[in-house]
Image (cartoon, rainbow, N blue to C red):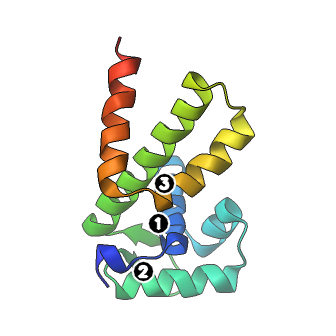
Amino acid sequence: MTDTQITQSLEDYLEAIYICQISRGEVRITDIAAETGFSKPSVNRAVNTLKEGGFVEHEYYGKIRLTEKGERFAANVYERHVTLKNFLKNQLGVDEKTAEEDACRMEHVMSEQTVKSLMKYIKTIENS
């Protein structure tokens, strides 16, 4: 599986693993289920798909760890999400809940070129 073949859903799982890894250190299926609200069987299927794609390493009934490839990809998704959410909230005055939901949707449907340009613009206005 290449980066371009990854679905929105799998991006969300990678982002959840990344967040759990940062906040908890070690990640298990139950942590991802709690973070995403998805069932353990759904999380398990997604983790297996991510493992096959080389994005995660997973010990049977054990810890899940992002590979270097997975960490790069997840960090990018997370940065887009946080940047978009903060822009919606801080620059446009959108409430926290709506900004979170909209950022999650936007991060998946915008082209890479648009995301890069928007992030550059946001950094420019935040630094002025």
Q: CA distance from mark 3 to mark 1?
A: 13 Å
Which of the image's four quarters has the C terminus?
top left
Q: Which mark is residue 107?
A: 3
Q: Residues within 10 Å of mark 2 (few under 14, many from 20)?
A: many
Residues marked 1 and 2 touching at CB (< 8 Å): yes
Up/down of 12 relative to 123, above or below: below
Front residue (pair 98, 12): 98
Up/down of 115 relative to 58, above or below: above
Residue at 31% over, 80% down: 54
- Residue 45 falls in which quadrant of the image? bottom right
Q: CA distance from mark 2 to mark 3?
A: 19 Å
Q: Work out whether mark 1 precedes mark 2 in sequence or the reverse, and give the earlier one.
A: 1
Query: Can see residue 109?
Result: yes
Q: Work out whether mark 2 precedes mark 3 in sequence or the reverse, and give the earlier one.
A: 2
Query: Can see residue 27?
Result: no
Q: Which mark is residue 14?
A: 1
Front residue (pair 68, 9): 9
Say which residue label 2 marks. Answer: 50
